[in-house]
Image: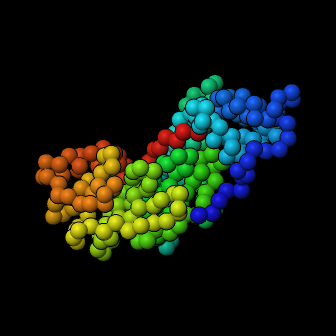
Amino acid sequence: MSTTAQSQSPPEGILIPGLPNDIALNCLARVPRCHHPVLSAVSKPIRSLLASPAFFNCRSLLKCSETLLYVLLTRRSSCEVKETYSLSTLYHKPNQNQEIEKNLVLVPSPPTPVRLESFDCVALGPKIYVSGANIAGFWVFDCRFHTWEIGPNMLTARTHGEMFVVDDKIYVMGGNLPSVNPLGEVFDPITGQWEIICGPEEMGYECCVSVGSKIYVVYEQGGLVFETKTKMWEKMSRKMRKLVRSLNKVARGFPGRFRGLSVSL
């Protein structure tokens, strides 16, 4: 996966005159995000610090992170050739002195236009991971710096797939495929590698949900439960299949068109 241009170490220069930079960093990391625009105007070293991974790591260690809302949605545009959908991302900018509606800001789009008729996404740490478009492409949005990265391609191109985070790994399950086997795949952000998840049988995938370390999969012929820790499958009862369908409808809301995520920064 490509990396952002920001340095992994604290910026050089005096942050607060008369204080060592490590103490100054601990002080500045406690400042609420709504004051960061003013703080960045104080000096170049502070402005550089606010855009560094070291700053966000310090906020996390001090338990000063704030939960922010990000909304991803597709916008439809028609042309003479065909109807297309482009991905847009809205960010709830923290500001204590304005109404919520005035704080919704459109953040930069991916450098390469993402054309999606359906997508899914999850938040893990400070990043949002997006898949869809019936291709193997995989996009990563870093909420700290509002930058996009192109992640490692999935092993199978799929659209209408469903994404989950289980034990700090990303699972992409199902989708509109000629044959839904492999049923899904799992991505490890630390290694940057994908791994195939094969179902025990061919199935017409319908939907799934995740609870704890288990992923509950409903398909045309029945239902299965995948235990991510042991990578084992077991049968699902008819009563549980009905519950999974209901939970999936509630969780998805606007399937393939709109998703809201909370990110701690």
Residue at 70% x, 50% y: name it: 8
The image quarter in which residue 12 lies: top right
Choose between 116 and 169: the one closer to the eye.
169
Q: Residue placed farthest to the front in the image?
A: 230
Identify which residue, 116 or 221, lies in the foreground: 221
Q: Is residue 221 visible?
A: yes
Relative placement, left or right, of 46 versus 53 is: right
> Which of 187/257 is in front?
187
Name the residue rendered at 53%, 67% in the picture: 152
Place of residue 91 in the rendered image (x, y in percent of width and height, measured from the top left): 57, 42
Instruction: Reply above or below: 63 against 216.
Output: above
Q: Is residue 175 visible to us here? A: no
In x, y percent, where is residue 208? 29, 54
Q: Nearer the viewer, residue 202 or 177?
A: 202
* Quadrant placement of the C terminus: top right
| Quadrant holding the N terminus | bottom right
Coloring applied to the structure: rainbow
**Residue ranking furthest to the left:** 238
Q: Is residue 34 left or right of residue 139?
A: right
Image label count = 0
x%, y% of residue 90? 55, 45
Report the side of 62 relative to 169 (left or right).
Answer: right
Residue 121 in the image: above or below residue 205 = above
Q: Looking at the rendering, which quadrant does residue 178 occupy? A: bottom left
Q: Give residue 14's position: percent from left, percent from top.
A: 85, 36
Q: Residue at x 26, y 60 (%)?
A: 232
Residue at figure coordinates x 76%, y 31% from the top left: 24
